[in-house]
Image: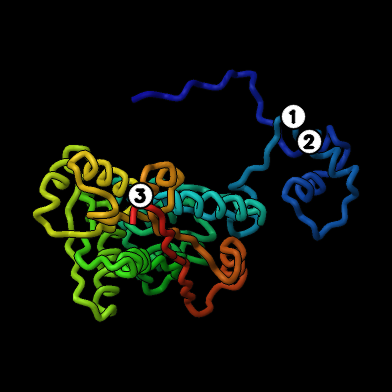
Amino acid sequence: MSQLPEAPADTSVPTSADVARLAGVSRATVSYVLNNNSTVRISEPTRRRVREAASDLGYVPHAAARSLRAGHTRMVLLAAAHVPAGPLHQRFYQDLQTDLRRLDYTVVQYGSVGLDADEAVRAWAELRPVAVVSPGGITLTPQGIGVLTRSGAKAVITLGPQPVDGAHALVMDQRQVGGCAATHLLSRGRRRIGVVMPQDPGLAVFSEPRLAGALRAVEESGTDARIQPLPLRYEEESAGELAERWRTLGLDAVFAYNDEYAMLLMRALQDAGVQVPSETAVIGADDLMLGRLLRPRLSSVRMELATAQPLAEMIDRLVQHPGGARERHDLLRARSVPRDSS
């Protein structure tokens, strides 16, 4: 087993008392300044002197000690997703972290790959977060939510296609994406629509609801249109095999799950001599910049996340006022962006 190197014997850890002596103030003043306590009036020159002293000494407050004094942490735990994160999720997490830090929360991303739901919950609870945001792919249960609540979490929030009993829910209904894509293709007169189903088990949480949304759109259209699922691996060979037998399928359009799969399949179709869009219309999702640079330019479904209240502020409100009714917020907004490929 590898061991951490020992610290040099003459290395000392600076304390708040050291900062107080250097700044010429009390330890209480150091605590008020460095913990951003605004309830006590301290002049700006004094605040500046304390911060400069802390910087010169390399002092930072002890988070665990501060939590013990306060009786709770200011930590919001963002559980890392078990599924590949698309650009929408990446932007969501980046914006959320930035906004939470502005509200003086410490944000910790916790990698839970390899842990089952119960193990993950216990690992999160050990850190005593004041709030937990859990993405799809980790199946929280009411029992797990109880463990988090008893460990001090004031708010447990799930991010996924369905709410979970006992938790606040940020719902991303992926059926909207499939329905939006299918509705666009139907509006272009397409009636035999393929829907790509990625053969990555981690993507099923997204692909299956998108297929269901496409099926519902066709059913509600009152047309004789049909949907055909198309299993596809994210490999050139798999796309080439599908393209070679494309004309035997009798399809005139395809919703390719997302822009990456759409670009993969569209190139394979073109290599096989299938004309896009005259023979087959193609639409993806995510509205990636790269799709706009293709020829033909790729049609896509653009997705956005929106809440009536900024999400970080909502988390802060739930932390400040725990115990209320569980909230549900439908985040996902989707709309088609027609371009040359459809």
Q: Which residue is mark 2?
A: 19
How far apart are labels 1 and 3 at the CA level?
A: 51 Å
| Foreground disc of the pair 3, 2 | 3
Q: Which residue is mark 1?
A: 57
| Foreground disc of the pair 1, 3 | 3
- Residue 168 is left or right of residue 315, and the answer is left
Towards the viewer: 270 or 40? 270
Vertical relation: 28 (above or below) 332: above
Towards the viewer: 89 or 103? 89
How far apart are labels 3 and 2 at the CA level?
A: 54 Å
Towards the viewer: 235 or 248? 248
Q: Quadrant of residue 38?
A: bottom right
Q: Which residue is mark 3?
A: 259
Which amino acid lies under the numbered mark 3 shown in the image of this protein?
A: Asp
Structural crowding at the residue carrying mark 2, measured as other residues with C-alpha within 10 Å and reported as few (<14), some (14–19) or many (≥20): many
How far apart are labels 2 and 1 at the CA level?
A: 7 Å
